[in-house]
Image (spheres, rainbow, N blue to C red):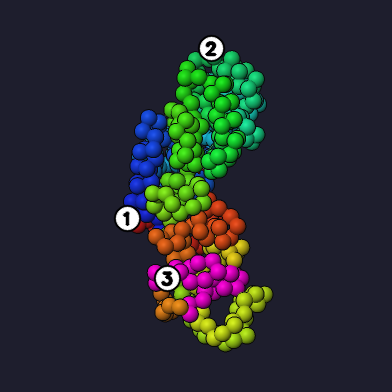
């Protein structure tokens, strides 16, 4: 008996159409980096088939993706050497130029290449500064082999709708660019909250996987990954007895508990606190004691359950990855991306 991640194809299709509905005038660049946010590239066909472009961080990811599709692939980290440039060309990638050192390398290309220029509008992570951006445009201007497809930037605080940085970044972007070049700014949070940020290309990630970028449950997205695991044992704990490593939970009355076959070795967060909900036979039951590598323990005093019953850790209508993330001081992104290779992945309708 093994933990399982079921990847819902209908939920993927639903979430992609939710993106199309929110931004009908924009093309969709779907983010499938980190193995489709941990959902596995081989299991997300509705995204791969229905998007206009696909984006990954690294060449190794582009290579795997190219085996699945002929669609344009955007390489977010760009290239750093002639070798990488050749690989990107061979894979027919569009490359991001975000660092001034990349400008010359691209300018020397011997083959036609599509380029996305990334500018820093206030996040101060990747992106050219204003003067570097102008130099970059100059460097590519008369180069018939370099096709500047788009200029992009990335929000630092899009998940906090009223954060002043959103407006200042958008102002900076509008000042530096105009509609002579196609533009792209919006991640999931901006797609869902800021009509002024949509431009020509939107870049949804987490919302495609049915997780709200705002960490809340109210959205019309459908969870894509359902993580489940079997009950391996059931026992009764007497008053005063403790459960798990460190004996951090002690029964204050006679309590029935279930031992579930999943732990941090599968990607269930070790920081999940006492009380984190686990869905057993449709009811939410509280986690007790520490999460171990292969096992967790759950208080099932209020429900009936038996050995072999399969429980849901996240991703059904009662229990979202966002909820478990909140109980674990992290974000849904990290949970789904962290499901380990020990878990059996499968496609479901
Ligand atoms: C990952 C990523 C996104 C998608 O962000 P979400 O919050 O998952 O929607 C968009 N743009 C860039 C540059 C990214 O790296």
User: Which residue is more in the foreground, 85 or 241?
Assistant: 241
**Residue depth check, mark 2 versus mark 3: number of the one nearer the observer:** 3
Which residue appears at 39% of the width and 69% of the height? 282
Q: Is mark 1 within 8 Å of ligand 1?
A: no
The residue under label 1 is 349
In the image, is residue 282 part of the stretch drawn in magenta? yes
Helix, strand or loop at label 2? It is loop
Could you give the CA–CA distance between mark 2 and mark 3, rounded to whole angstroms? 64 Å
Q: Residues within 10 Å of mark 2 (few under 14, many from 20)?
A: few
In the image, is residue 128 part of the stretch drawn in magenta? no
Which residue appears at 51% of the width and 51% of the height? 215
Q: Which mark is residue 54?
A: none
- 2 or 1: tag closer to the N-terminus: 2
Q: Which mark is residue 142?
A: 2
User: Which residue is more in the foreground, 108 or 52?
Assistant: 52
**In which quadrant of the rendered image does the C terminus lie?**
bottom left
Q: Which mark is residue 283?
A: 3
Residue 294 location (% of width, % of height): 55, 70
Q: How many marks?
A: 3
């Amino acid at each position: 008996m093994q933990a399982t991640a079921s990847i819902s194809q209908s939920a993927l299709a639903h979430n992609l159409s939710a993106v199309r509905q929110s931004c009908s005038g924009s093309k969709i660049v779907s983010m499938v980096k980190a193995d489709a946010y941990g959902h596995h590239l081989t299991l997300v066909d509705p995204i791969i088939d229905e998007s206009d472009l696909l984006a990954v961080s690294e060449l190794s990811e582009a290579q795997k993706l190219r085996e699945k599709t002929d669609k344009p692939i955007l390489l977010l980290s760009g290239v750093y050497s002639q070798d990488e440039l050749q690989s990107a060309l061979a894979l027919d990638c569009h490359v991001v130029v975000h660092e001034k050192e990349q400008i010359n390398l691209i300018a020397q290309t011997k083959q036609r290449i599509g380029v996305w220029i990334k500018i820093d509008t206030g996040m101060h992570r990747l992106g050219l500064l204003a003067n570097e951006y102008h130099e970059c445009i100059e460097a590519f201007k008369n180069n018939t082999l370099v096709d500047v497809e788009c200029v992009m930037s990335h929000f630092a605080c899009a998940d906090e709708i009223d954060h002043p940085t959103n407006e200042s970044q958008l102002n900076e972007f509008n000042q530096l660019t105009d509609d002579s070049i196609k533009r792209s700014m919006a991640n999931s949070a901006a797609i869902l909250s800021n009509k002024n940020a949509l431009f020509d290309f939107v870049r949804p990630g987490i919302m495609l996987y049915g997780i709200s970028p705002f960490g809340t449950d109210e959205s019309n997205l459908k969870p894509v990954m359902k993580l489940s695991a079997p009950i391996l044992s059931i026992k009764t704990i007497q008053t005063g007895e403790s459960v798990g490593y460190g004996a951090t939970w002690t029964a204050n009355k006679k309590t029935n508990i279930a031992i579930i076959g999943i732990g941090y070795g599968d990607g269930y967060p070790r920081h999940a606190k006492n009380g984190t909900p686990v869905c057993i036979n449709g009811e939410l039951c509280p986690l007790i004691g520490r999460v171990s590598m292969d096992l967790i323990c759950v208080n099932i005093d209020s429900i009936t359950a038996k050995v072999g019953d399969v429980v849901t850790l996240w991703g059904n209508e009662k229990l979202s990855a966002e909820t478990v993330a909140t109980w674990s001081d992290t974000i849904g992104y990290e949970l789904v991306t962290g499901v380990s290779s020990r878990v059996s992945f499968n496609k479901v309708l």
